[in-house]
Amino acid sequence: MRRARRFPPTARELRLFCAAWARLAQARMMHARMDAPAVLRRLRQPARAPGRPRAGAPTADEMRWALAAAARRAPWRADCLVQALAGKLWLESLGRDAELRLGALRGADGALTAHAWLELDGLPATGGALSPELAAFAPAADPPAAPD
């Protein structure tokens, strides 16, 4: 479900949007320079110093909204994997950690669709709102860890 668009945005919404835009740019550059296994390893790394959320830190709903809003307006590719990487970077900067989820869905035509999202405190922080569409993605098995 998309939030109703309010104009002008509140100061908090504007700060969240700008933070999301910066993290999306950072994630896109990382994604362009890394191969897929390296991106997945990076997404699975635990935060260095996870802790309690700071006062004023974005909620999972706010982060999902801000990343989706910034991704829709980005002049570069900002699909679900880039959004998950941006969310991971953002959460790490706040001392939080999230779980990467990968899923697949086979459509009626037989086509396979993949999706990546982060969960923060059991709620999606990237990759779409709680919806039947997201729930329909069957979790994929974790690929074996690459040797270091």
Image (spheres, rainbow, N blue to C red):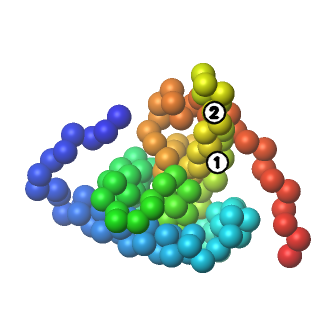
Type of the residue with mark 2: Ala
Q: Is residue 140 above or below residue 97?
A: above
Residue 145 occupies quadrant: bottom right
Q: Is residue 72 above or below residue 105?
A: below
Residue at 25% over, 58% down: 13
Residue at 44% over, 39% down: 129
How many numbered markers are drawn? 2
Disc 1: which residue? 101
> Observer-nearest residue: 106 or 47?
106
x then y, percent, for residue 72? 34, 54
Type of the residue with mark 1: Arg
x then y, percent, for residue 17? 30, 62
> Observer-nearest residue: 119 or 108?
108
Q: Nearer the viewer, mark 1 or mark 2?
A: 2
Residue 73 occupies quadrant: bottom left
Residue 136 occupies quadrant: top right
Image quadrant holding the N terminus, namely top left
Q: Is residue 48 visible?
A: yes
Disc 2: which residue? 111
Please, what secondary structure does the residue beneath circle 2 have? Answer: loop
Residue at 38% over, 58% down: 71
The answer to whether residue 15 is left or right of residue 126 is left
